[in-house]
Amino acid sequence: MASMPIKLLLFGFSVCLLGFASSSSSDLSEISLPSSSSVSPKVSLGFYYESLCPYCSAFIVNHLVKLFEDDDLISIVDLHLSPWGNTKLRPDNVTVVCQHGAFECFLDTVEACAIDAWPKLSDHFPFIYCVESLVTQHKYDEWETCYEKLNLNSKPVSDCLSSGHGDKLELKYAAETSALEPPHEYVPWVVVDGQPLYEDYENFVSYICKAYKGNKVPGACAKYSSGKSSHRVKVKRSPLVCRRGVSMWDWLERIKTSFLSHIDITGLL
């Protein structure tokens, strides 16, 4: 007889548990959890460049920075910077020849180290923007002032440079640039979701907006909502690019040769 109350208590306890489970499942069924499919993927934006190409620095300072002027716009973009460009790697896989001289090789490595030292885009882009702003002013030898301007510790980048890690990073960028399909023809080389924009790279925002599949469209995309598809634009002016295989020194040498030839010819007349 003494066992009856215990059995009743156990029965009542089990009923309570069942009621709680039923209530909990009912409550849980009313909670809507976000599905992974409801989160739209970001639009990938690849920027392949070299630090002393004037068109690359102008693009960073005057155009690429627009991404950060609109929080909604930058939130839908996965920006990847690749500081290598038209640099050539010698057969020894160690020696590099940069299009605009040795200082460009050095600055490319500085920017590669900055990306590595401060992986967050919001951390490394201001530094690269600062350096490239100096390039546009022909003051790129003052690049170290960017540490103080941005209140950054210079040690991570200086350690990266002195240890040789920066050189390894550059080889990584060399490999990814070499693997581009279609191959890059010049810099700036801007790619949106795997598609190069060619000479129309300054209009990169319109391509981002057209590639984005999400519902929350950034305000910056309003003027691109006409539904017209992206297409390669034929630019009437000369393309603002640094082409592969043509260095600044080669270009100056051609001008010099042409000028001297003109003097020789006129001297014979």
Image: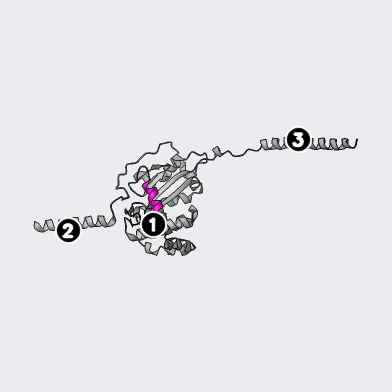
* Element marked by disc 1: helix
Residue at the disc numbered 3: 18
Stretch of the chain drawn in magenta: 170-179
The disc, 1 or 2, on the residue closer to the chain's N-terminal end is 1
Does residue 240 show up magenta in the picture? Answer: no
Q: Please name the residue shown 38% across and 48% down the image.
A: 177
What is the number of the mark on residue 108? 1
The Cα atoms of the two marked residues, 3 and 1, are separated by: 66 Å
Circle 3 Cα neighbour tier, 10 Å, few/some/many (<14 / 14–19 / ≥20) = few
The crowding category of the residue bearing disc 1, from other C-alpha atoms within 10 Å (few below 14, some 14 to 19, many at least 20), is many
Q: Nearer the viewer, residue 196 or 232?
A: 196
Amino acid identity at mark 1: Asp
Q: Is residue 156 visible?
A: yes
User: Would you say the magenta stretch is mainly helix, strand or loop?
Assistant: helix
Quadrant into which the C terminus falls: bottom left
Query: What SS does tag 3 mark?
Result: helix
* Residue under numbered circle 2: 260
Q: Residue at x 47, y 61 (%)?
A: 156
Question: Depth-wise, is mark 3 or mark 1 nearer the camera?
Answer: 3
